[in-house]
Amino acid sequence: DAEITQSPRHKITETGRQVTLACHQTWNHNNMFWYRQDLGHGLRLIHYSYGVQDTNKGEVSDGYSVSRSNTEDLPLTLESAASSQTSVYFCASSGASEYNEQFFGPGTRLTVL
Amino acid sequence: GQNIDQPTEMTATEGAIVQINCTYQTSGFNGLFWYQQHAGEAPTFLSYNVLDGLEEKGRFSSFLSRSKGYSYLLLKELQMKDSASYLCAVMDSNYQLIWGAGTKLIIKP
């Protein structure tokens, strides 16, 4: 069965460290997204990609970067982790049409001390 | 600005019916999605509306009025497993999903 996975599931790091969160999907979807979810807020879009070598900034992209070298993977990098980046991070993928729902990975809980 | 409003929390009784409302103001509209999210888990897709009216899918139905910027999710014959957060999201003119903060639904026996 097709799926979308994230690793690690939990991560504790220190302020200033570089952190990379992995996202891998076997749906063969062109579209991939990274969100963060914080209490009291809806899911907020960090970065997204519509295909290999395509990346775009979302609503809250400062301090984050992504790269898309193949269809399956969209790793999210925190260049220099800050306490404000403590959150739950979800990766999602979808087909090309606007009515295609997004399929979400299980999430990564990141704590920055 | 873009805004999605939903009640923060609702409580209902097992076996009953509950309606969760969502109002939106977005730059453009390309459809409205409802997702379910159990605590500690990922959101999962429930429904998609792009035309006015009611879409029924088993115990769940979703309604849309584009002129009013309004949608609701109707859950019938509530079961304890329906205890979850329900997320409303609108696809804007840039084909990005704008998410509400979610409605936490508590089901009591």
Image (spheres, coloured by chain):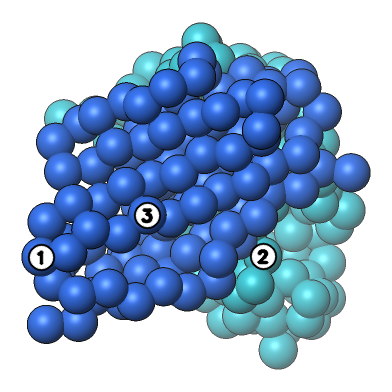
Chain colours: A cyan, B blue
Tell me residue B84's x, y (percent).
32, 66
Q: On what subunit does the disc labeled 3 rest?
A: B
Q: Are marks 3 and 2 in contact (CB under 8 Å)?
A: no
The image shows residue B8, relative to residue B63, as above or below, that is: below
Percent x, y of residue B100 = 61, 53
Q: Residue at x 12, y 56 (%)?
A: B77
- Check disc 3 and report the residue beneath it: B19
Q: Can you give x and y, in whole percent of width and height, for residue A49 in the image?
A: 66, 26
Quadrant position of the C terminus of chain A in the picture: bottom right
Name the residue tied to disc 1: B15
Q: Which amino acid does label 3 sit on?
A: Gln
Asked which secondary structure carries label 1, the reply is loop
Q: What residue type is labelled 2?
A: His
Give the side of residue A75 with respect to residue B64, left or right. Answer: right
Q: Which of B1 and B56 is in front in this view?
A: B56
Which quadrant holds residue A37? bottom right
